[in-house]
């Protein structure tokens, strides 16, 4: 039970920086029951055990400011009082710390940290498998819906002189996509067609990823179908974008608020249109 509580505590101290899951030095020091200064000095005395960013790195000012915007008021106050930029330790770095910090507490924390990362990877793997199954089911559903949409209007018109307003499945999806693209573009002061440009500039990448995320969430389209609206992006690109925005929204309050605002606007526009 004690180990499970420690794993939960470690999970609350994990941040994603430079594409890696990391723990900051002052959080580790708190877990180890030592001073942050003592922890960092021990690392400096053993440079061969921490040869690259795969083990640890010092965050820069921009990363620090972004981190401040993501944490709660208590953590913000603790971080804001630091005189130096924090050092971030990866899973490998934490494991290596067990070689230089031989206390019983350090060993206990390192075991719990390894267990956390094992659980984290298992969750990601299960999520990936679930997404693939959902995509397969949605693809089959789309095929069935398309066939039904082809048959029903023809049968209605052939058996009645009345004009029947039937909106095919994929026409509805296209309309939803157009609404989402227009709203996202407007939010970021862009033209809708700019979201499909083949550019990696930050001003375009983040809005494009948010648009992909919202289309995935608000339509029945699979990753491949969504990619077609963005210059033919492949399945993995769209999947990565959706995961990235989902994870970012959980930690970044600004992105969370942007998505929340856009989703309300999308719902309002869909009600008007349909």
Image (spheres, rainbow, N blue to C red):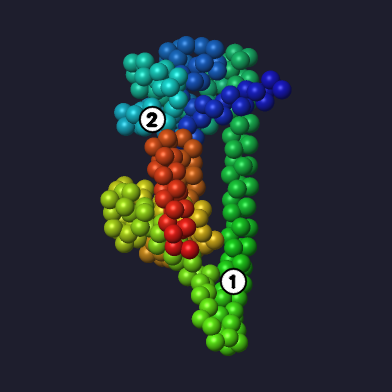
Residue 110 visible in the picture: no
State the residue lying farthest toward the right: 1
Q: CA distance from mark 1 to mark 2?
A: 44 Å
Q: Is residue 235 above or below residue 31?
A: below
The quadrant holding residue 162 is: bottom right
Residue ID at (63%, 31%):
115
Residue 29 visible in the picture: yes
Secondary structure of the residue carrying numbered label 1 = helix
Q: Position of residue 182 (x, y in %)?
A: 35, 57
Residue ID at (51%, 81%):
163
Report the disc number at residue 145: 1
* The N terminus: image quadrant: top right
Q: Nearer the viewer, residue 212 or 49?
A: 212
Q: Which residue is mark 2?
A: 69
Tell me if mark 2 has few (under 14), some (14-19) or many (20+) residues whose alpha carbon lies within 10 angstroms of its own.
Answer: some
Q: Nearer the viewer, mark 1 or mark 2?
A: 1
- The mark nearer the N terminus, 1 or 2, is 2
């Amino acid at each position: 039970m004690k180990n499970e509580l420690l794993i939960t505590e470690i999970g609350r101290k994990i941040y994603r920086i430079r594409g890696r899951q990391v723990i900051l030095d002052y959080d580790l020091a708190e877990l180890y029951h030592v001073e942050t200064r003592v922890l960092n000095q021990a690392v400096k005395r053993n440079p061969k055990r921490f040869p690259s960013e795969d083990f640890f790195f010092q965050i820069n000012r921009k990363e620090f400011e972004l981190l401040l915007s993501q944490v709660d008021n208590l953590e913000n106050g603790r971080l804001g009082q630091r005189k130096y930029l924090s050092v971030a330790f990866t899973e490998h770095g934490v494991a290596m710390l067990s070689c230089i910090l031989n206390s019983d507490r350090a060993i206990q924390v390192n075991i719990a940290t390894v267990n956390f990362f094992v659980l984290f990877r298992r969750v990601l793997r299960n999520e990936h498998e679930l997404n693939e199954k959902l995509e397969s089911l949605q693809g089959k559903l789309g095929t069935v819906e398309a066939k039904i949409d082809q048959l029903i209007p023809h049968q209605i018109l052939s058996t009645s002189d009345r004009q029947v307003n039937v909106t095919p499945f994929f026409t509805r999806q296209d309309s939803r996509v157009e609404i989402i693209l227009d709203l996202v573009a407007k939010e970021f002061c862009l033209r809708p067609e700019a979201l499909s440009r083949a550019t990696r500039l930050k001003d375009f990448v983040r809005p494009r990823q948010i648009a992909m995320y919202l289309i995935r969430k608000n339509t029945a389209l699979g990753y491949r179908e969504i990619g077609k609206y963005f210059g033919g992006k492949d399945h993995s690109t769209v999947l990565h974008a959706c995961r990235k925005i989902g994870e970012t929204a959980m930690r970044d309050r600004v992105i969370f608020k942007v998505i929340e605002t856009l989703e309300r606007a999308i719902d309002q526009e869909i009600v008007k249109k349909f």
